[in-house]
Image (tube, rainbow, N blue to C red):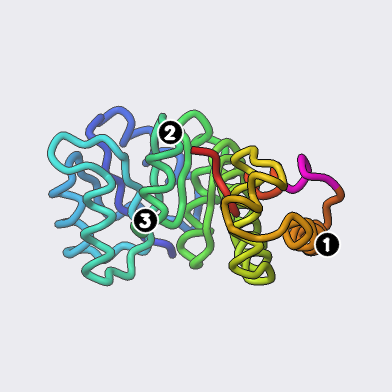
């Protein structure tokens, strides 16, 4: 039997949630509350397998409750139930210990399964929330890949080549770069040829765009 505590500041909502879960033979609601302080007290007293927790409570936010239970190393799984799909809230809650996130308008169909999932140590996200999480993870992975690639590329370029690449990004031609660095124009041409080869580009414009895109240089 999976034991559940429900914390929401609206009694009607709690009654609805209790009715939904009562229809499942393997789930028992053992406690209810309407505030953040009650949530912490109920978890301490009943040690439920799952805490179904609203975000907006009159005293403590769901984030505060989640964070505090995490610092206490509570074994109770936290399932956030809310009408909001704000991405900042979603990630802050997940980063602070919540394992599931269900939107209230999907609760009738998904709440029992969500409770079973988080009770078993699995994450559960509403489809809308899951899509946001996936998009953020993809963006983060893409950014990390770009930064790693840029770092690797910058390591392949010599300090002088990086310097010349930055000057290219400033719009200087070969003659101006040679004068700036007190080098011959032929030497600058050789360096630029090496830069093209290492970056896999064939023109000054491509080199500059590549450098700006991968943050190897910037225009000030």
Left or right: residue 60 versus residue 149 is left
Q: Is residue 28 above or below residue 73?
A: above
Residue 78 is tagged as 3
Q: Secondary structure at mark 2?
A: loop
Residue 197 is tagged as 1
Label 3 environment density (alpha carbons within 10 Å; few <14, some 14–19, many ≥20) = many
Residue 63 at x, y percent in the picture: 28, 47
Region in magenta: 203-207
Is 178 one of the magenta-colored residues?
Answer: no
Closer to us: 131 or 47:
131
Please tell me in which quadrant of the rendered image residue 200 appears: bottom right
Disc 2/disc 1 C-alpha distance (Å): 46 Å
Q: Secondary structure at mark 1?
A: helix
**Picture quarter with the N terminus:** bottom left
Q: Is residue 57 above or below residue 174?
A: above
Please tell me in which quadrant of the rendered image residue 90 appears: top left
Q: Is there a contact, CB below 8 Å, between mark 3 and mark 1?
A: no
Residue 57 at x, y percent in the picture: 21, 36
Q: Residue at x 61, y 43 (%)?
A: 135
Q: Secondary structure at mark 3?
A: strand
Closer to us: 109 or 165:
165
Disc 3/disc 2 C-alpha distance (Å): 18 Å
Label 2 environment density (alpha carbons within 10 Å; few <14, some 14–19, many ≥20) = few
Q: Residue furthest right?
A: 202
Upstream in sequence: badge 2 or badge 1: 2
The mark closer to the camera, 3 or 1, is: 1
Q: Residue at x 63, y 43 (%)?
A: 169
Magenta part, dominant SS: helix
Reading the image, the residue beneath label 2 is 86
Residue 99 at x, y percent in the picture: 44, 57
Q: Is there a contact, CB below 8 Å, between mark 3 and mark 2?
A: no
Q: Is there a contact, CB below 8 Å, between mark 2 and mark 1?
A: no
């Amino acid at each position: 039997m999976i034991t559940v505590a429900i914390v929401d500041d609206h009694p009607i909502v709690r009654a609805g949630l209790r009715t939904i879960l009562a229809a499942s033979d393997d789930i028992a609601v053992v406690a209810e509350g309407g505030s953040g302080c009650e949530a912490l007290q109920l978890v301490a007293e009943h040690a439920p397998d799952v805490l179904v927790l609203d975000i907006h409570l009159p005293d403590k936010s769901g984030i505060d409750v989640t964070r505090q239970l995490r610092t206490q190393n509570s074994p109770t799984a936290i399932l956030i139930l809310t009408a909001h799909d704000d991405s900042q809230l979603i990630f802050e809650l997940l980063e602070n210990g919540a394992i599931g996130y269900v939107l209230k308008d999907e609760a009738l169909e998904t709440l029992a399964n969500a409770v079973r999932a988080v009770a078993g140590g699995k994450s559960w996200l509403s489809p809308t929330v899951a899509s946001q999480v996936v998009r953020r993870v993809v963006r983060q992975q893409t950014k990390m890949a770009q930064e790693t690639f840029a770092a690797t590329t910058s390591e392949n370029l010599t300090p002088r080549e990086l310097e010349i690449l930055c000057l290219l990004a400033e719009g200087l031609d070969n003659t101006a770069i040679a004068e700036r660095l007190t080098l011959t124009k032929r030497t600058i041409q050789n360096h630029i040829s090496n830069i093209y080869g290492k970056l896999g580009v064939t023109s000054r414009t491509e080199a500059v765009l590549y450098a700006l895109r991968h943050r190897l240089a910037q225009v000030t």
